[in-house]
Amino acid sequence: MPSIDVNGTTLAYKDTGGPGPAVVFSHSLFFDRTMFAEQVERFGRAFRVVTYDHRGQGKSRRSAGLDMDTLAADAAALVEALDLGPCHFVGNSMGGFVALRLAARRPELLRSAAVLSTSADEEGQLENFQALLDHARAVGVKKTVDALMHIMFGETTLTSRPALRDHWRARFGKLDPAILDAADAVVHRKAVLGELVGATVPLLVLSGAEDNAYGPELSQRIADTAANATHVRVNDAGHSLAVERPDLVNDHLADHFAAT
């Protein structure tokens, strides 16, 4: 996989080299760029699709500075270094934290943004999530996989999509312990909702009806705050929308791209 040095780290990425405009996909915590395989398949021929691994995750360098502001600066540097702007920027969960910061702070880099299963607020379940991270540090990530699966996937996926469930459960069980440093930065992030008041980048906000981490009400807060935002609730899906309902997600993204 190619890699690029930006913002004091090295990011692994994949570029389909399509005719454009560019679409950049930013992944969720505990995943990597491969969570967007269905989106790459759908859009990789008509668009220049770039997926990448955040610093400290996937095949990117294990670096210091895992806070959301630094990850957003990484993404901006990636867009600039690969000459992708103005691009469509899509983020699931943690990737959504990045997308919202770019929409607020670097709108000139974006044609549009789309956020899936994310929040613009501070962590509302800090005590519970911190306890889980502390437990994972004590016993190992593999022994906390059941709890992670409950957070990252909706009930429909856990009970009715066994191939998808088992694939990611196995992947989570093999995660590098360094993932807990990234997770700590996620749960201790700062709010960005106030910065969206003046944001005018076209913004699609998708939420999972079964999301146990960031429910649809948090997505509605984003849509109510940003000037040019639309919220759509997706049924039969939880926190990992891009992999749980790629069919509907891709249809909504296609309409969003076409309108912007």
Image: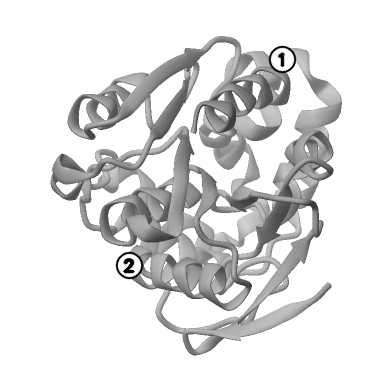
Measuring 78% from the left and 35% from the top, which residue is drawn there? 38
- The circle on residue 69 is 2
State whether residue 212 appears in this view.
no
Q: Would you say 201 lies left or right of 194 here?
A: right
Q: Amino acid at mark 2?
A: Asp
Circles 1 and 2, Cβ within 8 Å, touching? The answer is: no
Measuring 38% from the left and 35% from the top, which residue is drawn there? 202
Q: Would you say 125 lies left or right of 142 here?
A: left
- Residue 120's spot in the image, x, y percent? 27, 42
Which residue position holds label 1?
Answer: 159
Task: Tell me if residue 229 comes above or below residue 182 in the rendering.
Answer: above
| Position of the N terminus by quadrant | bottom right
- Residue 124's spot in the image, x, y percent? 24, 39
Measuring 71% from the left and 15% from the top, which residue is drawn there? 159
- Residue 86's spot in the image, x, y percent? 50, 56
Task: Tell me if residue 20 comes above or below residue 57 in the rendering.
Answer: above
Say which element carries label 2: helix
Instruction: Report how far apart the C-alphas of labels 1 and 2 lie in the structure.
Output: 36 Å
